[in-house]
Amino acid sequence: MNDAATLETLVVKHAPSLEPGLTIVDTSAVLGESTIDLVGIAPDGTLVLIALGLVGDGGMILRALGAYAWCIEYPDAVRQRYHAARRELRWPPRIVFVAEGVPESFVRKVKRLGAPSVECVEFRALEANGTSALRFERRQHVRRAPTDRTPVTAKPLPDGDPVAEAVIAIATAPDEVPAPAGSAAPGVGATPTGAVARATPPTAPPNAPAAPVALVPEPVRLQAVDAVAPVPPPPPAGTTAAPSVPTATPRPASAISSRAAPGPGTAPPATPAKKGGRGRTRRPRTPAWPPTPSMLSAEERDGNDEEPS
Amino acid sequence: MTLRLQKRPLDDVKALEKLVVSNAEALEPEVRIIDARLVLGDATIDLVGVDPEGGLTLIALGITADGNMILRTLGAFSWAVDDPTAVKQRYPAGNIDGGRVPRVMFIAERLPEVFRRQVRQLDVPVIDCVEVRHFDAGRTTAVSFEVVERIRRDGAAAVATRPRDGAAAVTPDATADVSPTWRQFFPRA
C-alpha cells in the first residue's frame, strides 16, 4: 500500500467486507473543524466514522475525536446532513480506525476515547503464488454501554491467532474466475461481498462457470493501462472474443482484476523489443480497436457472428 | 490606593511551566509538583503532581490548547493507567496511591471551544481545563488560574460541568468543586 488515497478507494469499494451491510455515505467529510476520511451507516442505522491511515497515529485519533465530538455536540446537524441516506440515525456514532499497521501505543490511546464503540482494524494486502488478497483484521474493539462510560471492555487479541477476530475478513471469493493473463494493480480487485480478492493461478483448470466468462482480447486490456506494457499479438485460437464495444464488456459480479502470472495457455509470446536509432528500446504499437476481421481467427469470427447484436 | 493590573502575555511554554511550578498552591491547594517533562510510554507530559490523597495529577501545558496536548496527555494517561506500579516505583517518596486513577489538568492561556469539546469526549474520569493569566501589577506580577471546564465521571454517571454556560447538567455536589467566581451561575440545591 503506497498511500492513504489508495486505501480509501479500497475501503470504499469493499465497505461490506469491513462490516457486513456498511454503506459509505460520505468521504473526507468536514465535521466541525475535523475532516474524517469516511462516514458510513451501519445496517442498524448507526453512524460510523472511519479514520484511515497507513500507520495508526495521533492524527487519526485527533481527526476521529474531533469529528465524534462535533457529532455529539450537534446531533441535529449530523442527522440533517445524512438525512437522505437513512430516515433514522441511531446514536451515538461509532469510530473505526483502519490502518495497515496499528502500533500498541496507538491502541492504548484509542482505548481511552469516550466513544461507546471504537474499533481498530488492520488492513493487509497479501500476495501468494500469484494470488492477491485483501484482508481486514479486527485488532481491537472497545465497547461501552452508552449510559456508562466508565468500565472499559477491551478485547485484546492474541497475535498468534489472527483467525479469532477475523470475522470481518478473509471471506474467500465464492466462485473463482479464470484470470486473464496480464496484470492489474495489486489488491484492487475483490469480490463485492468478500474481503479477499483472489486470482486463480494460471495452472488451474478453467472450470466452466454458469455465466460465460468472456476473455477480453489483449489489446483492450492493455489500452486501459495506457499502453505502457508491450502489446502482445492477438490471442491464440480458441479464445472467446469480446463484444465489439470495449466499455460494455460484461463482467460477472465476482469479476476480479488480479495479478497473476501468465499461464501457458493464455500467455501470448513475448514481443521482442526493437532497438531505436539511439539505442533506446522502442515500444511496439498498439493495434487499433476494434480488431479487423483479419486479426481474428476463424473460430472467433464465427463466435462473433453467432452472438446477437 | 488602587492596584492596576495589566495583562502580560506569556512568551512560551517554559515560562508557563515556571509560573505553574512556582504557584502550584494557587492552582490546587496542597498539590505538589514532583516532576517535569516526564516520559510515560511514548508520550511526554509537562508536569506531574501529587495531591494530598496520593492521587497522581498529569498536567499538560500550552499557550493555546491544541490537539497535541490531548495526544500527549492521552498517551501518558493510558500508560499510567495500564502500568500504575511503574509510576509508583518511579517516585518511591511520592506516596502515590497506585489504586487511584490519575487526574488530568490542561493549563493554557487560551482554551478554545474546539479543544474543550474534544476533551469532553475522552474517557478520563477527572479533567480540569484551566486558563492561566499573567498580570503586571505595579512592581510585582500576579497569576490567575481559572477553571473553565471541569469534567467528573463518577461510577455510572458521567457529569460534565461547564461553568461558562450554566445550563450544563450539574450534580448538586459538583458545585463544591466550582470556584467561587462561577458558583453564582449554578442552581442552588
Image (cartoon, coloured by chain):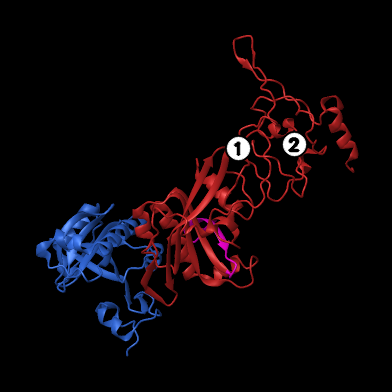
Chain colours: A red, B blue
The quarter holding residue B62 reads bottom left
Q: Residues within 10 Å of mark 2 (few under 14, many from 20)?
A: some
Magenta residues, dominant SS class = strand
What is the secondary structure assignment of the residue under circle 2? loop
| Callout 2: chain | A
Q: In terms of depth relative to the viewer, which is nearer, B6 or B150?
A: B150
| Callout 1: chain | A
Residue drawn at x 55%, y 38% is A129
Report if residue A131 lies within the magenta region.
no
Please state which amino acid type lies under the numbered disc 2.
Val
What is the secondary structure assignment of the residue under circle 1? loop
Q: Are marks 2 and 1 in contact (CB under 8 Å)?
A: no
Report if residue A37 lies within the magenta region.
yes
- Looking at marks 2 and 1 on the same chain, the residue that comes earlier in the sequence is marked by 2
Magenta highlight range: A29-45
Q: Which residue is mark 2?
A: A216
The mark total stands at 2
Compared to residue B133, the image places residue A248 above or below, namely above
Q: Measuring from the top left, give residue A255's x and y in whole percent.
A: 68, 46
Asked if residue A230 can be seen in this view, the reply is yes
Please state which amino acid type lies under the numbered disc 1.
Arg
Q: Which residue is mark 1?
A: A259
The quarter holding residue B74 reads bottom left
Residue drawn at x 38%, y 79% is B166
Mark number, residue A72: none
Q: Measuring from the top left, give residue B163's x and y in whole percent.
A: 34, 76
Q: In terms of depth relative to the viewer, which is nearer, A39 or A279?
A: A279
| In the displayed structure image, the side of residue B114 where residue A131 appears, left or right | right
Q: Residues within 10 Å of mark 1 (few under 14, many from 20)?
A: many
Q: Are marks 2 and 1 on the same chain?
A: yes
Q: Which residue in the rendered view is the most extreme toward the top?
A: A277
